[in-house]
Image (tube, rainbow, N blue to C red):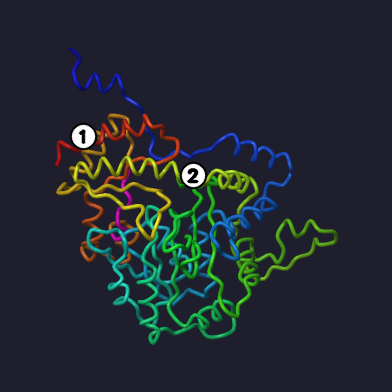
């Protein structure tokens, strides 16, 4: 009789963690973009911006080359820089913090809520000082944070807020808001909603990621959007993003194609982070397919939920009465196991062809942030959430048989430890 290990090997599948879902539609659109002769920022990028703004229920979207660039430009648009403080969850990916650091601001980490990856809003309130200019909430896994609580915190702390002086765009935004600005790191959450509002129309400023591992991809890429600000023209804000993203040039390549429009000015010695029409071509066809892709993710999450609930394993809750996530990541937390045991389980699953991950190792554990003086001991809830966490593969390339394979093997491996 064959051993259990041999039976597993005979039936072994290879389940990648997060491959991109690219169809012939995207491939054909990219080929058409290449044939058009217009491959940098052009008509397809502008069309993707228009459609994303419509999708997010916002007035404008700016497509860029990454979510990190989008978040950094959000800070710069709002005049945040040297001498300012930005509050960030300790439990997130480095881009959330590094974008603020790129602008010269000081990052202030706050701990998570107990048994929750969401930031502790009481600790946010405690961290606000006269130097605080922004709080960045992270919609981890595609689940939108409780922005009602966050807005209540910053409103209650208005007396501490010191807006930037002058009449620059950033100064006027700060003066108009009159409080700490609320930013959304929405890298995971395109298509998510809370209380009937879409990701993108909730925070003051929002950034999205279109990286290859995201639900919606342009290979690399990202976008910024924002809520309308009374007294400030959205076209002015949009134009400033264009300046920041293309060396400070007063005209982009598309504008310079008009007859006699070769001349341009350089307003500032700024950055290069625009999206290309090749990337936008992928995004346009992804957006056509996106509702169906989100529905498929929801189906997979339902099967994982049933498994975890049966095993008594904690997991992210992706939908409820007043919210629906983008179902980007499936985080499981196995009660009572140590970091060492978690690593064993990850290896055993990989040996069976099930590739998993961990989202995230808290930033105070990383060398760069430890060298800034941060210590994970000061963030016990973030560490406790991380210690026993395993992220399961969740993507639209999974067949029903693949999902069943993940469920069966996860159950077989984990049952030995609980």
Q: Give the range drawn in magenta.
A: 357-364
Q: Residue 279 carries which label?
A: none
Residue closer to the observer: 408 or 342:
408
Residue at which label 2 appears? 212
Residue drawn at x 22%, y 49% is: 388
Left or right of residue 265, residue 70 in this image: left
Q: Residues within 10 Å of mark 1 (few under 14, many from 20)?
A: some
Name the main secondary structure of what is drawn in magenta: loop
- Which element is circle 2 on? loop
Q: Where is residue 250 in the image (x, y as percent from the top left)?
A: 70, 67
Residue closer to the observer: 322 or 24:
322
**Residue 22 to residue 1: above or below:** below
Q: Where is residue 200 in the image (x, y as percent from the top left)?
A: 50, 62
Residue 362 inside the magenta-drawn segment: yes
Q: Residues within 10 Å of mark 2 (few under 14, many from 20)?
A: some
Left or right of residue 180, residue 25 in this image: right
**Residue 319 to residue 33: above or below:** below
Locate the N terminus and report the quarter of the image it occupies: top left
Q: Position of residue 312 (x, y in %)?
A: 19, 46
Q: Which residue lies furthest to the right in this view?
A: 260
Mark 1 and mark 2: Cα distance apart in space: 29 Å
Residue 140 inside the magenta-drawn segment: no
Q: Where is residue 229 in the image (x, y as percent from the top left)?
A: 56, 75
Residue 51 quadrant: bottom right
Residue 418 quadrant: top left
Residue at which label 1 appears? 413
Left or right of residue 250, residue 67 in this image: left
- Which element is circle 1 on? helix
């Amino acid at each position: 009789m064959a051993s259990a290990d041999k039976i597993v090997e005979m039936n072994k599948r290879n389940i990648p963690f997060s491959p991109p879902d690219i169809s012939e539609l995207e491939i054909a659109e990219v080929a058409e973009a290449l044939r058009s002769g217009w491959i940098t920022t052009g008509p397809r990028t502008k069309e993707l911006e228009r459609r994303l703004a419509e999708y997010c229920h916002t007035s404008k979207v700016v497509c860029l080359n990454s979510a990190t660039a989008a978040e950094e430009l959000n800070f710069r648009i709002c005049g945040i820089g040297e001498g300012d403080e930005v509050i960030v969850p300790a439990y997130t990916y480095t881009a959330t913090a590094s974008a603020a650091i790129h602008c010269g601001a000081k990052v202030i980490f706050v701990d998570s809520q107990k048994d929750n990856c969401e930031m502790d809003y009481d600790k946010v309130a405690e961290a606000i000082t006269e130097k605080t200019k922004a709080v960045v909430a992270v919609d981890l896994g595609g689940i939108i944070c409780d922005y009602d609580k966050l807005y209540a915190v910053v409103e209650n702390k208005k007396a501490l807020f010191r807006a930037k002086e002058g009449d620059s765009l950033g100064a006027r935004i700060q003066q108009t808001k009159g409080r700490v600005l609320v930013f959304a790191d929405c890298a995971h959450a395109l298509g998510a909603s809370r209380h009937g509002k879409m990701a993108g129309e909730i925070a003051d400023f929002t950034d999205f990621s279109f990286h290859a591992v995201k639900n919606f991809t342009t290979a690399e890429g990202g976008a910024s959007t924002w809520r309308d600000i009374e007294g400030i023209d959205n076209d002015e804000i949009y134009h400033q993003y264009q300046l920041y993203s293309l060396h400070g040039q007063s005209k982009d390549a598309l504008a310079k194609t008009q007859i006699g429009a070769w001349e341009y000015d350089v307003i500032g010695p700024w950055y290069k982070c625009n999206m290309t029409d090749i990337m936008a071509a992928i995004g346009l066809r992804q957006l056509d397919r996106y509702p169906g892709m989100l529905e498929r993710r929801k189906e997979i999450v339902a099967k994982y939920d049933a498994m975890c609930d049966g095993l008594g394993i904690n997991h992210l809750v992706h939908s409820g009465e007043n919210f629906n996530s983008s179902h980007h990541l499936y985080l499981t937390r196995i009660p009572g196991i140590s970091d060492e045991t978690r690593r064993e389980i990850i290896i055993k699953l990989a040996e069976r062809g099930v590739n998993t991950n961990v989202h995230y190792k808290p930033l105070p554990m990383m060398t760069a942030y430890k060298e800034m003086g941060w210590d994970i001991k000061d963030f016990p809830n973030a560490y406790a959430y991380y210690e026993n966490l395993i992220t399961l593969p969740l993507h639209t390339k999974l067949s029903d048989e693949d999902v069943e394979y993940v469920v069966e093997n996860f159950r077989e491996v984990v049952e030995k430890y609980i």
